[in-house]
Image (spheres, rainbow, N blue to C red):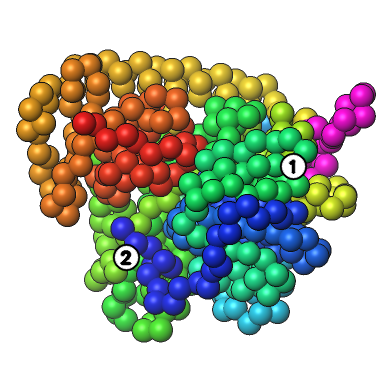
């Protein structure tokens, strides 16, 4: 599937990879986090290279719905359930700075974006309670939210709030602009080079499939970190959610705001002014990666829901993306434990990465250049060790966050056991005779080894069904035609190439 945003003719200009090169900073990943951080560092006069495994925007940023809003569904009331209002205010301040920085960048470089009101709406009594809580916490955090009787949606609602004057855009326009600005400041942007490992000595050595490069520090902007230091893969829940763009007949009105439901399954709506007229974008129906028997059914349900409420709507693009929620609900950014202060990272934006990513980039840059951002200090306060070694970070946490981490990991262990039990009961494929129908993937056994067999575009592939991260058993994604890991969200092509971390290793062929 290709998103509306990634379906574009013009490639973003990039540079050659030169093995053996040394930079002040190497940034891994060319999504919004990586490119914003790289630009900020390059502007300060540093030599910076961005290494992207696939292509610019190929990860979550090219598959988002790209609403840039401080009203974020029911995020603030969820945070308030775990933290003091002071910490919630720091989160809002971080997002306000991220949003303002991005809008300034867009205005300065004449990148198109649209000002829109953001809404959180409810369709049930429970949702209405959540909307009321969100209103109270948002007001307490200084956001000018308004109670709205009629949010202008073509179905009945049970309550809604609005935050005027937020923004939406095409995320690939942003990445293109950040990339051009970065390269104009001497930055090196490389595509198609996957970082496999990072080791630190007097300088950091970055191992890729195409050779090593060196730096004084590395920033992991890979979504879930591709290094296991700090065990962040066990503190993040990987979720897959869906989106579709529609052409809608002139007789069917489209509301102009940006909407998100307070209930599960999530329903997200916005518009897009394409060259051929206003389009409708619907999103939602998320689930934990690799845990859904039929992702295709989730996507189909989203499309059916949209068609039901917007008569005549016809999808032009459907897509999905992966994003991460921290067990303590707060984005992670800063120095990685056991990285000697030379390995930094940012992730866990909980589907609100447009502003959180830029906030994280500002915080990482301040960390590297020696600045001080009060909201960053409130979210993750900084403590210098008694021996005077590098500053370490004590991330805000809460009893609820700690309990969520324990529950997530217990659930991961159960999922691992269930996956292996199922794989051991899978049918044998001794003569390698199993050929799934077009678009399908199944798990079989070669002796005791679980093998993932799939047929896509007429090609049947047989690869190990054991995730190269920590040995989870993969499951078939019938929407994206990928093998997905239900433990920490790694994803692979039918031929076993890595699409999404935390793993960095391909699946071996079965034979
Ligand atoms: C369907 C959906 C809708 C969303 N809607 C919104 C929204 O409306 N508003 C909002 O604020 N947020 C939204 N989000 C969240 C937001 O899109 C993300 O939080 C954000 O794009 C994350 O950006 P990133 O740069 O951190 O990650 P990514 O964009 O995923 O970038 C990481 C990059 O790292 C690369 N990489 C990974 N491993 C390696 C490696 N080993 N070596 C080299 N490169 C590597 C990847 O290929 C990728 O390009 C949505 C998310 C989804 C899934
Ligand atoms: S992603 Fe961790 S085991 Fe697969």
Q: Which residue lies at the image location 78% right of the left edge and 30% below the top edge?
A: 394
Estimate the spatial distance between the alpha carbons at disc 2 and disc 1, rounded to whole Å.
45 Å
Crowd tier of the residue under label 1, counting other residues whose Cα lies within 10 Å: few below 14, some 14–19, many 20 or above: some
Corner quadrant of residue 198: top right
Q: In the depicted view, which residue is nearer to us: 396 or 337? A: 337
Q: Quadrant of the N terminus?
A: bottom left
Q: Which residue is mark 1?
A: 203
Drawn side of residue 473 relative to residue 92, left or right: left
Q: Which residue lies at the image location 41% right of the left edge and 66% below the top edge?
A: 6
Query: Residue 242: in sight, yes or no?
Result: yes
Q: Which residue lies at the image location 65% right of the left edge and 71% below the top edge?
A: 183
Q: Position of residue 141 (x, y in %)?
A: 75, 49
Number of numbered markers: 2
Q: Which residues are magenta?
A: 376-393
Q: Position of residue 113 (x, y in %)?
A: 57, 75
Q: Is residue 321 magenta?
A: no
Q: Which residue lies at the image location 46% right of the left edge and 57% below the top edge?
A: 192
Q: In the depicted view, which residue is nearer to us: 499 or 61? A: 499
Image vertical order of residue 298 relative to residue 508, above or below: below
Drawn side of residue 361 relative to residue 318, left or right: right
Drawn side of residue 116 relative to residue 504, left or right: right
Corner quadrant of residue 10: bottom left
Crowd tier of the residue under label 2, counting other residues whose Cα lies within 10 Å: few below 14, some 14–19, many 20 or above: some
Q: Position of residue 441 (x, y in %)?
A: 20, 39
Query: Residue 27: in sight, yes or no?
Result: no
Q: Position of residue 209 (x, y in %)?
A: 48, 46
**Circles 2 and 1: CB distance less than 8 Å?**
no
* Nearest to N terminus: mark 2 or mark 1: 1
Q: Which residue is mark 2?
A: 317
Helix, strand or loop at mark 2: strand
Q: In the depicted view, which residue is nearer to us: 302 or 163? A: 302
Image vertical order of residue 211 relative to residue 14, above or below: above
């Amino acid at each position: 599937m290709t998103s509306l945003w990634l379906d574009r003719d013009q490639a973003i200009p990039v540079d050659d990879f030169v093995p053996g090169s040394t930079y002040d900073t190497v940034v891994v990943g060319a999504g919004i986090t990586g490119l914003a951080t790289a630009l900020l560092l390059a502007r300060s006069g540093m030599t910076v290279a961005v290494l992207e495994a696939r292509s610019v925007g190929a990860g979550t940023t090219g598959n988002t719905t790209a609403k840039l809003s401080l009203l974020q569904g029911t995020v603030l009331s969820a945070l308030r359930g775990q933290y003091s209002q002071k910490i919630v205010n720091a989160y809002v301040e971080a997002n306000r700075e991220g949003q303002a920085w991005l809008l300034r960048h867009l205005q300065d470089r004449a990148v198109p974006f649209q000002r829109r009101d953001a809404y959180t709406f409810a369709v049930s009594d429970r949702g209405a309670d959540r909307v009321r809580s969100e209103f109270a916490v948002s007001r307490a955090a200084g956001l000018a939210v308004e109670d709205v009787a009629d949010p202008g949606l073509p179905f009945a609602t049970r309550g809604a709030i609005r935050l005027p004057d937020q923004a939406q855009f095409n995320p690939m326009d942003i990445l293109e602009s950040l990339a051009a600005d970065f390269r104009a400041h001497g930055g090196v942007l490389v595509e198609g080079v996957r970082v496999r490992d990072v080791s630190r000595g007097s300088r950091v050595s970055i191992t890729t499939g195409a050779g090593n490069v060196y730096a004084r520090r590395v920033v992991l902007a890979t979504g879930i970190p591709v290094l296991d230091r700090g065990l962040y893969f066990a503190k993040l829940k990987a979720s897959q959610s869906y989106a579709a763009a529609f052409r809608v007949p002139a007789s069917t009105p489209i509301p102009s705001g940006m909407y998100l439901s307070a209930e599960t399954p999530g329903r997200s709506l916005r518009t897009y002014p394409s060259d051929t007229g206003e389009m409708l974008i619907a999103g939602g129906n998320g689930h934990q990666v690799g845990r859904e028997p039929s992702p295709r059914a989730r996507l189909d349900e989203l499309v059916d829901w949209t068609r039901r409420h917007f008569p005549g709507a016809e999808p032009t693009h459907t897509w999905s993306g992966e994003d991460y929620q921290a067990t303590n609900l707060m984005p992670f950014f800063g120095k990685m434990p056991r990285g000697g202060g030379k390995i930094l990272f940012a992730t866990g934006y909980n589907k609100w990465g447009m502003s959180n990513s830029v906030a994280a980039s500002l915080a990482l840059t301040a960390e590297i250049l020696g600045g001080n951002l009060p909201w960053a200090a409130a979210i993750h306060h900084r403590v210098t060790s008694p021996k005077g070694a590098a500053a370490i970070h004590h991330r805000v946490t809460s009893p609820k966050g700690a309990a969520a981490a324990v529950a997530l990991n217990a659930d991961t262990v159960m999922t691992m056991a269930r996956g292996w039990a199922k794989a051991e009961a899978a049918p044998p494929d001794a003569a390698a005779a199993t050929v799934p129908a077009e678009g399908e993937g199944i798990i079989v056994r070669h002796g005791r080894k679980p093998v993932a067999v799939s047929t896509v575009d007429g090609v049947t592939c047989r690869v190990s069904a054991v995730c190269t991260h920590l040995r989870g058993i993969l499951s078939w994604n019938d929407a994206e035609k990928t093998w997905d890991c239900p433990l920490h969200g790694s994803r692979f092509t039918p031929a076993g190439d890595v699409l999404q971390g935390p793993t960095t290793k391909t699946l071996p062929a079965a034979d």
